[in-house]
Image (tube, rainbow, N blue to C red):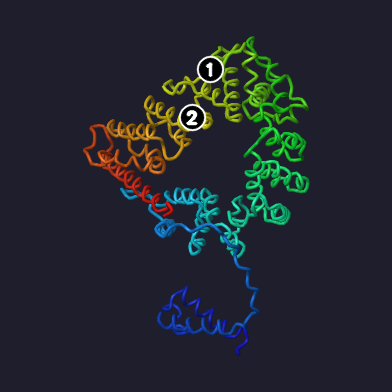
Amino acid sequence: MEKPDEGYGEWDELVGAALLGTERRRGGGPAGSPATLLDAAAVHAVRRRAGLRPAEAAARPEPAPRDPRPEPPEAARRRLAQLLADRTAGGGSGRRGASPDLTELLPQWLAAAGRHGYRSPAALVPALLDAARARTDLRPQALALAGTRGLWLARLNPDWRFALRGGAGGAGELPTATDRAGVERLWQEGLFAERVALLGAVRAHEPAAALGLLSATWATERAEDRLMFLDSLRAGLSEGDEPFLEAALGDRSRNVRATAAEMLSALPRSALAGRMAERALACVGPEGFTPPAECDAGMLRDGVVKRPPAGRGERAWWLGQVVEAAPLSCWSERFGGLGPAQIVALPVVGGDAWAEELHAAWCRAAVRQRDAPWSRALLGPPSAPPAAGPGTASMAERAKLLETLPDGERAEWVAEFIRAHGLSEAFQLLGVCLVPWAGTLGRAVVDALDAAREAGSYPWSFSGVMGLAERCLDPAEAGLLEALTASAEDPPDASPGAATYWSEAFQRLAATLRLRGTMLSELTPA
């Protein structure tokens, strides 16, 4: 057999001829015509492979753990293969036309499959992991569907190692919460992703047991891991967690301390909430404001950040944090037994700047404490002009307040807002409504889109809302769109081609709704 380096000089000449062109190397090298070059390259490739010394076979990996969940029905498996293949096919950045965007249907397929408790077909796990690597928004649901086989493959392929760092450990490999020995073994020996998933599973079954697991190893965990584990305690947060969180206020990590303080302030009867209430009531009352004169050691320990952002005064910054962390229940007695709506409507002694500071802090407190009455008061009526809202004119803040309301009330509020103000400021509000949208909300969105078309509005400015409607409208509402799909002439003041665009957009919306309806029926167990 030839020595390992023999023949490599001639191979280098072949590579040079391929790069420079056979015409320029004629007369001196091994390559003649392009066909001769390719033949020579093929011969040398075989020689190089045949000349390699065989290596010792690696140990065969253990089989993947069994995943007891069922696979989806056959039609749903074919649909998943189609959606994953379309993801890699790519698409142009130009006009979308009337065809549904399959890449935007993949998240909905994964969510529906998760609700049914399915696992991924084995043959599609690699494509599913590739999709999760490319799109972080898909990872939780894709990794949950991939389950134990996905984690098993991720350990064998460096491209998929991200799956071992995430929190979706896969449903099949976790011991049951009642398997004390299995839980303890995985908690002590498992990968970080498995431990996060385990903590969440135990927390859902028995909150105190999850807290016991975390307490046993807390002192030895890395700071970033402590923060992730602490975040897992948000589910099922209760007064029983207070001693652990109070101790975490002395943690060596600033982020851990801040998270513990935030979680304690969400428990209105916690000692921290009581301390914050005492500070807040000393600062705010019917007579006006007396913001904190300093940020003392006690405030620092309770999570108050001393240094304000650029452009904010120190005392206003400290006041906002104190009010935000105080239980909202303390304000009724402070203001003579008034309810949230009455308190929010009171004039604020000290001017508009202090009113904005106070109302913004109340908004953050209502979101943190999930207090629906205060959220209603701070949102105000949906028909009121956004700039005149009693709590905040910010659509982002309003969206957070809406999330504290029951699903039906939330949809009604946003529908009324759209009927009063149109769609231009409603995008963030729509994003927090339950999917599929309730009938009244879906009809309000479709009517507003139709009104925008009739008014000759620039059609591309509504592409975001149209895309949201494709994902969120109830498939049963497809019939509402049939009358809107016909082409029409452009209104006098409209952009050229606007009518055709609107027609295509409504056709695409109707087709997407019908396809989503088919997808959901395919996933339904026989």
Q: Position of residue 137 (x, y in %)?
A: 52, 48
Point out which mark residue 341 bears.
Answer: 1
Q: Name the residue at 65% across, 19% down.
A: 330
Question: Is 219 on the left-hand or right-hand side of 319?
Answer: right
Distance from the alpha carbon under mark 2 to that under mark 1: 20 Å
**Left or right: 486 as drawn, with respect to 122:** left
Q: Position of residue 425 (x, y in %)?
A: 43, 30
Report the quarter where the N terminus lies: bottom right
Mark number, residue 211: none
State which tag comes first along the sequence, 2 or 1. Answer: 1
Up/down of 65 relative to 307, above or below: below
Residue 450 place in picture, x, y as percent: 30, 34
Q: Of circles 2 and 1, which is in front?
A: 1
Where is 147 relative to 295, above or below?
Answer: below
Is 82 on the left or on the right of 502, as rendered?
right
The quadrant of the picture occupied by the C terminus is bottom left
Single out the residue that lies furthest toward the left.
Answer: 489
Residue 451 in the image: x percent, y percent? 30, 31
Provide the residue designation for mark 2: 395
Res 218 → quadrant: top right
Cβ–Cβ under 8 Å for marks 2 and 1: no
Which residue appears at 74% of the width and 40% of the height? 253
Please name the residue shown 72% across and 45% down the image: 214
Q: Is residue 461 left or right of residue 226?
A: left
Q: How crowded is the residue under tag 2: few (<14 C-alpha within 10 Å), some, or many (20+)?
A: some
Instruction: Using the image as rendered, state which of residue 19 and residue 118 is in the foreground.
Output: 118
Q: Is residue 513 above or below residue 40?
A: above
